[in-house]
Image (cartoon, grey):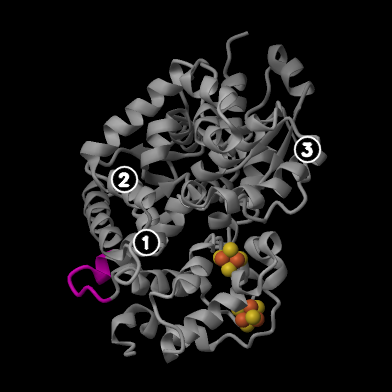
Amino acid sequence: MSTHDLVPLERARAGLDACVHCGFCLPACPTYLALEDENDSPRGRLLLMGALLDGSVRPDDPAVGTHLDQCLGCRGCETACPSGVPYGRLLEATRESLLPHRPLPFVARVVLGVFANEWALRPALALARLARASGIAALAARLLPARLAMPFAMLASTARPERQGYEPQGDGSRGTASLLTGCVMEGLFTEVNRATERTLTVNGWTMRTTDGQRCCGALHAHAGDADTARALARENIAAFERSGADVVVLNSAGCGAMCREYGHLLADDRAWAVRASAFSDRVRDVHQLLASAGPVMLPVPAHARDVAAGAIRVAYDAPCHLQHAQRIVEPPLAVLHAANGVSLVPLADSDQCCGSAGIFNLVLPEVAERVLAPKLVRIAESGADVVATGNPGCLMQIGGGLRLSGSEVQVRHPVELLDESYARAQRPG
Ligand code: SF4
Ligand code: SF4
């Protein structure tokens, strides 16, 4: 068998060669811990990639496909690896190489098709909001058997209580920022996007809107559909060039990690490589921006002190694409520390994946459930009232799991909690 048709993997070979097979990454791998099979570990998967390249296994071998499909792409192995193996890039190159040999499952093709096409995405998100607002999602989550109920529980967990906004006051001295609003974030977590804009304004940023932006392409890149990811990336780069903001800000860890990769994704495209790399250089995570000069702590007025005194216990769960892919660890904690009324409690194994991983939990729900189970136990042990995490997939996966397990614990984005504390500080007495 020729390796000509595995070109993306062939190009990434140097990263593969960096692996010394030490196994330090094994305890950091959620699928190895859940499935207890070396083939479902980083080291095992890297060996499979090498076997694909040397031709000892075929790209259409179903067993190889299964073990690579069962990787969450969480990149927990990357931060554990002493040799600097770029596992995330290797995985995406492998999946891109395998795509012509193994079509994606039907569910994946439908979901990726919807996210790539505005005409399908808008009505799909509107339908989801309708199911949430009408209570159908919550009802289905209660009545259906667990496996079927999970997508509805995830959707129901995105509901937020209505609350009064406030007029954010800031001096605009930090520069201009524009939010990549995202598909699921703007469609189902609209309030988190508005909270992001308000808290950044309070922290000295002037917010600009960017028309013509699209899905970031992360779901497509992770599934191996790099061509669609590149097409979406080009549209976003052009849109944010037109908006001219100093920084492109993201509040979704997965989308942020993808946007930082645009330079790599389009490195071979002569017309776009420089623009893509300039775009990636402008990308910032919202926690990073907030924590880089603060965040501002607004004094709690006397009439709101009772709220601050009865602090809610918040456990922070680190999204993999913030912790491992973007290596942003402290800033979300700084945001939570700055939120009056929040008391942080430790969460064991908070750096372990929850099993969401883009559309992984829709395509391989059994594996996702096994990865989520220890997370739910840790959350219960923490005694938290709220789990805070900065990624829509994690918010929904943990939120859905908590709901189905009968837990009262809520899930929130850290920025929501900061925004609520700012709102309290500005509430008229
Ligand atoms: S990926 Fe890194 S940690 Fe894992 S076996 Fe290879 S060298 Fe060791
Ligand atoms: S990306 Fe995550 S699931 Fe995949 S091999 Fe690495 S640690 Fe394991």
Secondary structure under badge 3? helix
Query: Amino acid type of disc 3?
Result: Ala
Query: Amino acid type of disc 1?
Result: Ala
Where does the image place residue 358, in percent across and percent down from the top left?
47, 51
Q: Which residue was labeled with disc 1?
A: 221
Residue in the image at 62% along x and 29% along y: 298
Where the C terminus falls, by quadrant? top right
Label 1: how many Cα within 10 Å (few below 14, some 14–19, many 20+): many
Q: Which mark is residue 5?
A: none
User: What's the magenta bit mostly, secondary-structure-wise?
Assistant: loop
Where does the image place residue 394, in percent across and percent down from the top left?
56, 44
Secondary structure under badge 2? helix
Decide whether residue 274 is among the magenta residues: yes
Where the N terminus falls, by quadrant? bottom left
Q: CA distance from mark 3 to mark 1?
A: 34 Å
Q: Which residues are magenta?
A: 268-275
Q: CA distance from mark 3 to mark 2?
A: 34 Å
Q: Which residue was labeled with disc 3?
A: 380
Mark 3 in CB contact with mark 1 (< 8 angstroms): no
Q: Which mark is residue 115?
A: 2
Is residue 217 found left or right of 360 in the rendered image?
A: left
Secondary structure under badge 1? helix
Query: Amino acid type of disc 2?
Result: Phe
